[in-house]
Amino acid sequence: MTSPDDLRFRSAEAGDAAAVAALHADSWRRHYRGAFSDAFLDGDVAGYLLAEWAGRLSAPEPQARTIVAELEGEVVGLAHTRLGEDAAWGALLDNLHVSYGLKRLGVGTRLLALTAQGVLDSSPASGLYLWVLEQNAGARAFYSARGGTCVETVAVTPPGDDPARLNGSPMSLRFVWPDPSRLLPTEG
Ligand SMILES: CC(C)(COP(=O)(O)OP(=O)(O)OC[C@H]1O[C@@H](n2cnc3c(N)ncnc32)[C@H](O)[C@@H]1OP(=O)(O)O)[C@@H](O)C(=O)NCCC(=O)NCCS
């Protein structure tokens, strides 16, 4: 029996690309269907994400931060952030995903807290924001529970800027934390 106490969190390395991409693709297939096209999710999503992660992790940009959660040597969560992405809202949490079988055990909360800590360490006055699909009720509930505020709704930008990877015209919501310190763990 595994326990959340056995979790380890660390910065991602180049050798994590395949495992991170596989977790990301599985999560998109489970949670983004309806917004992303079936042709993309059942086709080249894994290859698209593997190329994306191989590039990101082999030559990390100075403003990029990727944290992975590990359980018994297996990647079970990921959080990827771009510092200073938006002049008004601050750092962009571009991706946050937890293995399907480990949801609702606090992994996402811990990844969000570590993300906030990294943002504040780099730029103490920075805010944090992200985009979440309108249809993604679970993630929206999670961000609201973590104190995020929805400030606007816009059309989704397709993966790789390819409109064929979307199903119709899905919308995404911008959630913001002007003060990311509220995401840090509290004592006790
Ligand atoms: C959204 C996600 C990252 C949250 O991570 P998690 O580890 O499951 O969340 P936590 O266990 O830390 O959740 C803490 C609290 O958030 C809220 N919450 C989390 N998921 C929820 C859901 N599906 N429905 C309602 N509330 C939810 C609850 O208040 C929960 O506390 P509780 O379980 O005691 O009720 C994770 O569920 C996930 O990977 N989902 C699929 C991918 C995804 O949608 N990513 C976000 C893209 S923007």
Image: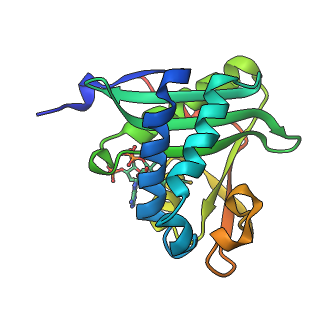
Q: Position of residue 144 (x, y in %)?
A: 53, 56
Q: Nearer the viewer, residue 66 or 50?
A: 50
Q: Position of residue 75 (x, y in %)?
A: 38, 32
Q: Position of residue 93 (x, y in %)?
A: 64, 42
Q: Nearer the viewer, residue 19 or 94?
A: 19
Going by the image, does 63 lie left or right of 149? Answer: right
Q: Is residue 20 above or below residue 41?
A: above
Residue most extreme to the left: 1
Asked whether the viewer can see residue 188, the reply is no
Q: Nearer the viewer, residue 59 or 12?
A: 59
Residue at image point 20% right, 31% down: 3
Q: Is residue 143 above or below residue 166?
A: above
Residue at image point 66% right, 32% down: 56
Q: Is residue 55 above or below residue 72?
A: below
The answer to which image quadrant residue 63 occupies is top right
Q: Position of residue 175 (x, y in %)?
A: 66, 54
Going by the image, does 2 lie left or right of 80? Answer: left
